Amino acid sequence: MTCGKDYPKLNHAKVEGAIVEVCERCTRFGTKVDVPQIYAPIKKPIIFSEPDELNLELVPEYGKIIIKARKDKGLSRYDFAQNIKEKESVMKRIEDEIMKPDEDLIKRMENLLNIKLTEKYDGFVPQRGKKRIDLTVGDIVEVS
């Protein structure tokens, strides 16, 4: 809010309880106050984890691997869930492969069962049985 004058240098003054920008002449209607300048915080750079960790994905049939390793250790689903501090219903959904576990839960399961549930993913998905056909404009357009 300003007093209405268009001066290059305006002062901050408290006029009737509100702090407003006023010119030198209008400063006398209130008391001059110093308003500290607010600086934007410096954003810290985002540090990404190692590139190898970014390319990890769950192995196929991870539920069967978890069930087999859990049974080899002689743990019931309830005991297994208690050991990794997770709900039994969540473990059932993971073992049935309805739900995918997050990274923290994967690490806890891997440590308890001494198994590996992740593998490196290079981003390349091979397509089997399909030949690549390169078409040109001449193949599509009929010349009369």
Image (spheres, rainbow, N blue to C red):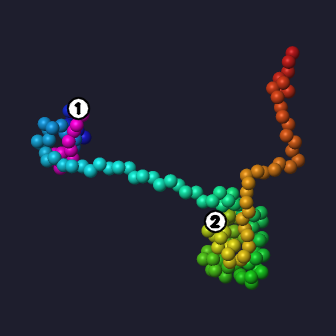
Residue at left offset 73%, top offset 52%: 123
Residue extending farthest to the bottom is: 74
Tell me where residue 33 appears, x and y as whole percent.
Answer: 18, 49
Measured along the vertical axis of the image, is residue 138 above or below residue 124? above
User: What residue is shown with label 1?
Assistant: 6
Q: Badges 1 and 2: C-beta atoms under 8 Å apart? A: no
Q: Give the range drawn in magenta.
A: 6-19
Q: Few, some or many C-alpha atoms within 10 Å of disc 2 (few <14, some 14-19, many ≥20)?
A: few
Q: Few, some or many C-alpha atoms within 10 Å of disc 1 (few <14, some 14-19, many ≥20)?
A: few
Specify the label residue 122 is tagged with.
Answer: none
Tell me where residue 120 sits by quadrant.
bottom right
- Dot 1: element: loop
Tell me where residue 124 appears, x and y as whole percent.
Answer: 76, 51
Residue at left offset 21%, top offset 49%: 34
Observer-nearest of 79 and 110: 110
Visible residue check, residue 18: no
Mark 1: amino acid: Asp
Residue at left offset 75%, top offset 74%: 67
User: What residue is shown with label 2?
Assistant: 103
Q: Which quadrant would the N terminus be assigned to in this image?
A: top left
Observer-nearest of 123 and 100: 123
Mark 2: amino acid: Glu
* Image position of 76 (left or right of 126): left
Q: Which quadrant would the C terminus be assigned to in this image?
A: top right
Q: Which of marks 1 and 2 is nearer the N terminus?
A: 1
Give the distance between the C-alpha atoms of the residues marked 1 and 2, in whole angstroms: 58 Å
* Image position of 90 (left or right of 4): right
Tell me where residue 128 appears, x and y as whole percent.
Answer: 86, 49
Number of numbered discs on residues: 2
Observer-nearest of 85 and 54: 54
